[in-house]
Image (cartoon, rainbow, N blue to C red):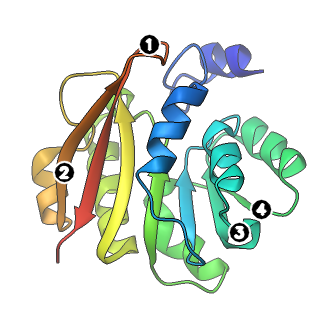
Amino acid sequence: MFLRQAFGRSTTVGGIVPSGQALARKMVAELTLDQSWVLELGPGTGVFTEELLARGQPPERLLLVEANSIFAEHLAKKFPTVRVMQGDARDLRGILASVGLTQVSKIISGLPFRSFNSDLRNDITAAVGATLTVGGVMLQFTYATKPPLPVEAALRAGLSGKRGELVLANMPPAIVWRYQKFA
């Protein structure tokens, strides 16, 4: 399924293999899980979702936003107690409003930011900034040495980024970035 989507829909899939368990463990370990909502962007086949649930995230407080209809349908079947929305990350405010939320304090993202054109990267970065509460955290990974979010767009959105660890056990190796909403 992943390979068919990767080769058939290169605008919504950023790799030729799904993220691995080691990357999922590292990303989720960076979040303090409690009873608050977690928004997952670009969950793909659900490796981060599985780790979030395994670490105790309440399924009724987990919202998955997936643009790819095949993945969204797969996720809804695989995780029937989790809210799955097929949608565009540029419309996070509308997506959150549809489930009665205005903002969240935690976002974990598998979006292929480096594969997007600059307008799309900037628009999603602005949507993330508008969606996170002050002090809220977004985790994003990248295969590149550069930050996944455009630096100037992140600053405009009130986000400061910090490079984290390189996860060598992922294929390909990935770098975890932690963004925090400062204003």
104 shown above or below 84 = below
- Please provide percent x and percent y for residue 101: 56, 83
Quick one: label 3 or label 1, which is nearer the N terminus? Answer: 3
The residue type indicated by label 1 comes to: Pro
Report the Cα–Cα distance between label 4 and label 2.
28 Å
Quick one: label 4 or label 3, which is nearer the N terminus? Answer: 3
18 shown above or below 74 = above
- Please provide percent x and percent y for residue 154: 18, 55
Q: Which residue is denoted by mark 3 in the rendering?
A: 58
18 shown above or below 102 = above
Quick one: label 3 or label 2, which is nearer the N terminus? Answer: 3
Q: Quadrant of residue 62?
A: bottom right
Q: Nearer the viewer, residue 2 or 62?
A: 62
Local secondary structure at mark 1: loop
Q: Quadrant of the C terminus?
A: bottom left
The dot on residue 172 is: 1
The dot on residue 11 is: none
- Please provide percent x and percent y for residue 180: 25, 63
In the image, which is nearer the foreground, mark 4 or mark 3? 3
How many other residues sit within 10 Å of disc 1, few (<14), some (14-19) or many (≥20)? some
How many other residues sit within 10 Å of disc 3, few (<14), some (14-19) or many (≥20)? some
Local secondary structure at mark 3: loop
